[in-house]
Image (tube, rainbow, N blue to C red):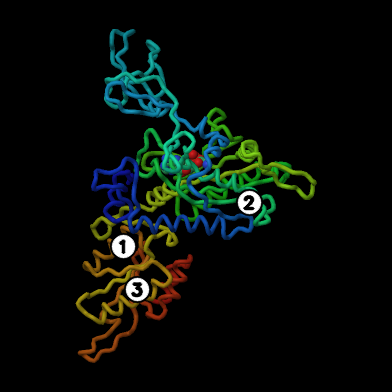
């Protein structure tokens, strides 16, 4: 089965993951709202990133900086001069395109050198007969395209009530710069020793010329970036420290995506060519993912050298150095930067988790999320919603488990339907309360106090005493094997 973006978009809307922004007004171009399940998934991604890359490491700390920064930051960083894309307009239909994107599309050409014969010319190539390049709009096919001109991607605004040049401010296009301008604050307040890193997760804004492909490229998105500072005079395992740490971060990020469920065959590393490198980069490697739109960048890991700290020292007049006690000298650290898009990570986790299978002649859609990513960990379902004791017990179980995890209660359909609904949003476990659990007081029958747990992936069941549920889920949701639970608490005795 090859998953399409349309299938994902439809599931996201239908099941409360992602909605078009301001949909009732016709939508805002390339802006999306995360719904009740989407926000849980996104928070889980950010929480795991923070736990694994910040909290658990002695060499990492975090910050949460303001989105509006001093405008000189963007002069020093190079964004005002270099953060541009080449843009072309169609003179006829007025649509705008990124010139480099237009070059990636084939085009139709009536060649004058061959008496007007029609050819489809491959992307980026001239006509092999007359040497002409594409000049017509890829959308309407009629209008001439203008010559490319550079367009700055930063959103501009004004601080305070007066719209004048002196009050211009920009919405940050990346979270990274706050880590550089706070380098000395963090160094001094936390008494850090090289190598160390500063992380930040937050919103970034880019006025992309051609956003699109759902949440893949939007104008407002979330990033989690790490600036990892190393001493350029150090060596690790016989290699310059910055080069060693660059490779280490590439491997660690790749392992992180694998750990939470992305399959190896959908991941690859892509080395940037020299002419593709950003103005600050000595080497950049992307982790690409095979999205439904094809192989595309999931995150980038760059060696930014000492470019940023030197630039900010120059423009602010403040020293941004580290005192190397051993060598008794001030050094400007080099920086390795793992830069991840949270929305792209979410899209990749959804695409990789999506499975369609046939069960007893019917289609079953499952999101096989890693339990730590799943928006809902457990769904508690009463087998009969007209039996008060069953409903009361199911609600009490939900309330008890919800002290630790996101747990939902649902009685709005028959049990088979409820299971399918939870499969489709990736809930790893369902708990069913039935007559056997609570007994039948009218007939004088006592309940056994046990409930059924159903495993999403195998669809197997186990019969577990109610008071054992917290311990069982603690185990299962922290990497415990379902087979052990199934063996200890068999469904049929
Ligand atoms: N500080 C370096 C930096 O921002 P980048 O490659 O421009 O590098 C890092 O961005 C990551 O941010 C990308 O790999 C991608 O995951 C995400 N990203 C960038 N632009 C985006 C956009 N318009 N929409 C969604 N995510 C985006």
Task: Identify the residue under disc 1.
Answer: 422
Q: Residue at x 54, y 36 (%)?
A: 271
Query: Disc number at residue 185?
Result: 2
Quarter of the figure that contains the C terminus: bottom left
Do callouts 3 and 1 mark residues in contact (Cβ within 8 Å)?
Answer: no
Task: Give the side of residue 53 with respect to residue 25, left or right.
Answer: right
Pointers 2 and 3 in contact (C-beta within 8 Å): no
N-terminal-most mark, 2 or 1: 2
Q: Residue 10: percent from the left, percent from the top?
A: 27, 49
Image position of 143 (left or right of 197): left
Q: Assign a secondary structure to mark 3.
A: helix
Q: Which mark is residue 117?
A: none
Q: What residue would you read off at disc 3?
A: 398
Task: Classify 10 Å Cα crowding around label 1: few (below 14), some (14-19), many (20 and above).
Answer: many
Of marks 2 and 1, the one in the foreground = 2
Packing grade of label 2 (10 A; few <14, some 14-19, many >=20) is few
**Would you place residue 469 above or below residue 82 in this image?**
below
Residue 326 visible at all: yes
Decide which of tag 3 and tag 1 comes sooner along the chain. 3
- Specify the quadrant of the image occupied by residue 466: bottom left
Residue drawn at (28%, 12%), measured in percent from left and top?
A: 117
State how far apart marks 2 and 1 are (Cα).
Answer: 47 Å
Can you give x and y, in whole percent of width and height, for residue 23 in the image?
A: 26, 47
Q: Nearer the viewer, residue 383 or 214?
A: 214
Across and down, in percent, residue 141 comes to 28, 22
25 or 484, which is in the foreground?
25
- Tell me the mark number nearer the camera, choosing from 2 and 3: 2
> Ligand 1 closer than 8 Å to the CB at disc 3?
no
Is 406 displayed left or right of 47 in the figure?
A: left
Disc 1, SS: helix
How far apart are the alpha carbons under marks 2 and 3?
Answer: 45 Å
Pick out the residue farthest to the front: 162
């Amino acid at each position: 089965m090859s998953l399409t973006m349309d299938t994902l978009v439809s599931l996201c809307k239908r099941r409360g993951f992602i909605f078009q922004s301001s949909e009732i007004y016709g939508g805002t171009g390339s802006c999306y709202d995360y719904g009740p399940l989407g926000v849980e998934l996104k928070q889980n991604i950010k929480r795991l990133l923070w736990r694994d890359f910040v909290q658990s490491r002695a060499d990492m700390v975090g910050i949460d900086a303001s989105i509006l920064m001093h405008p000189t930051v963007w002069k020093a960083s190079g964004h005002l001069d270099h953060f541009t894309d080449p843009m072309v307009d169609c003179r006829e239909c007025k649509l705008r395109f990124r010139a480099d994107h237009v070059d990636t599309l084939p085009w139709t050409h009536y060649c004058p050198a061959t008496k007007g014969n029609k050819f489809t010319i491959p992307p980026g190539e001239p006509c092999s007969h007359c040497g002409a390049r594409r000049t017509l709009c890829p959308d309407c096919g009629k209008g001439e395209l203008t010559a490319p001109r550079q367009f700055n991607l930063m959103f501009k605004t004004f601080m305070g009530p007066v719209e004048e040049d002196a009050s211009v401010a920009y919405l940050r296009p990346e979270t990274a710069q706050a880590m550089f301008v706070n380098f000395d604050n963090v160094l001094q307040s936390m008494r850090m020793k090289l190598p160390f890193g500063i992380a930040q997760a937050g919103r970034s804004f880019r006025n992309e010329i051609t956003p699109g492909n759902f949440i893949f490229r939007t104008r407002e998105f979330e990033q989690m970036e790490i600036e990892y500072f190393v001493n350029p005079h150090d060596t690790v395992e016989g290699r310059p420290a910055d080069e060693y740490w660059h490779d280490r971060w590439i491997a660690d990020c790749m392992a992180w995506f694998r750990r939470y469920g992305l399959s190896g065959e959908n991941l690859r590393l892509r080395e940037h060519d020299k002419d593709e490198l950003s103005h600050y980069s000595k080497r950049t490697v992307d982790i690409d993912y095979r999205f439904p739109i094809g192989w595309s960048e999931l995150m980038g890991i760059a060696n930014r050298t000492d470019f940023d700290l030197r630039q900010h020292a120059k423009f602010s007049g403040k020293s941004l150095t580290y005192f190397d006690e051993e060598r008794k000298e001030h050094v400007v650290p080099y920086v390795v930067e793992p830069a991840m898009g949270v929305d792209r990570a979410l899209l990749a986790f959804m695409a990789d988790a999506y499975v369609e299978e046939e069960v007893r002649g019917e289609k079953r859609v499952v999101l096989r999320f890693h339990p730590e990513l799943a928006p809902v960990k457990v769904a508690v379902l009463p087998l009969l919603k007209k039996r008060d004791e069953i409903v009361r017990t199911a609600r009490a179980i939900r309330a008890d488990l919800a002290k630790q995890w996101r747990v939902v209660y649902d009685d709005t359909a028959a049990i088979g339907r409820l299971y399918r609904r939870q499969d489709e949003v990736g809930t790893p476990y369902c708990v069913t309360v039935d007559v056997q659990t609570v007994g039948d007081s009218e007939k004088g029958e006592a309940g056994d106090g046990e409930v059924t747990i159903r495993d999403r992936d195998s669809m197997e069941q186990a019969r577990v005493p109610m008071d054992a549920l917290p311990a069982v889920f603690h185990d299962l949701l922290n990497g415990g094997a379902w087979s052990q639970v199934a063996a200890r608490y068999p469904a049929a005795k």
